[in-house]
Image: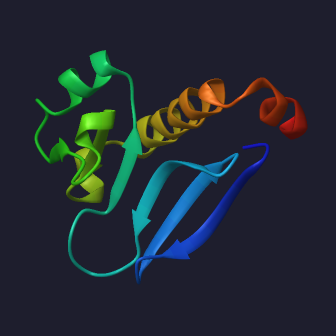
Amino acid sequence: MPGATESLQWGEHLVFKIGGKMFAIANLDFGGNVLSFKCTPEDFAELIEREGIIPGPHLARAQWVALENWSAMPAKEINTRLRQAYELVRAKLPAKVRAGLA
């Protein structure tokens, strides 16, 4: 994803950002949720009804969900949802920052 960066934070969490803003977090440790990402309010309501998907700890108020395990969502859907998370966060960046990413 153009302009996306990744960094290790909070111990064993791989944080993905665009323009300095997070859009996804992968837990590299054995324990806890495996992946968290931003979504729309509508998708948030739908996704937390599914088995193995919960409101993102500490980030639920910003419409983040967390996968409790990798089998909670098919890989193809994970790819689509991560792209959507990236686009949601990118769209909220100031125009000057977005222009610098293009």
The relative height of residue 38 versus residue 84 in the rendered view (above or below) is below
Where residue 71 sits in the image (x, y, percent)? 25, 53
Q: Is residue 82 left or right of residue 49?
A: right
Q: How is the image coloured?
A: rainbow
Measuring 44% from the left and 58% from the top, which residue is drawn there?
Answer: 25
Is 87 placed left or right of 1 in the picture? left
Farthest-out residue, top? 42
Seen in the picture, residue 39 relative to 6 is either above or below; the reply is above
Q: Quadrant of the N terminus?
A: top right
**What residue is drawn where x is 41% and y is 84%?**
11
Q: Position of residue 69 (x, y in %)?
A: 23, 59
Residue 93 pos. (x, y %): 66, 31
Q: Position of residue 86 (x, y in %)?
A: 59, 37
Q: Is residue 91 above or below residue 75?
A: above
14 and 70: which is toward the camera: 14
Number of numbered tags placed on the structure image: 0
Give the position of the C terminus as an image quadrant.
top right
Looking at the rendering, which quadrant does residue 38 occupy?
top left
Residue at the image point whose x is 14% and y is 34% from the top: 50
Tell me: residue 64, above or below residue 95. Answer: below
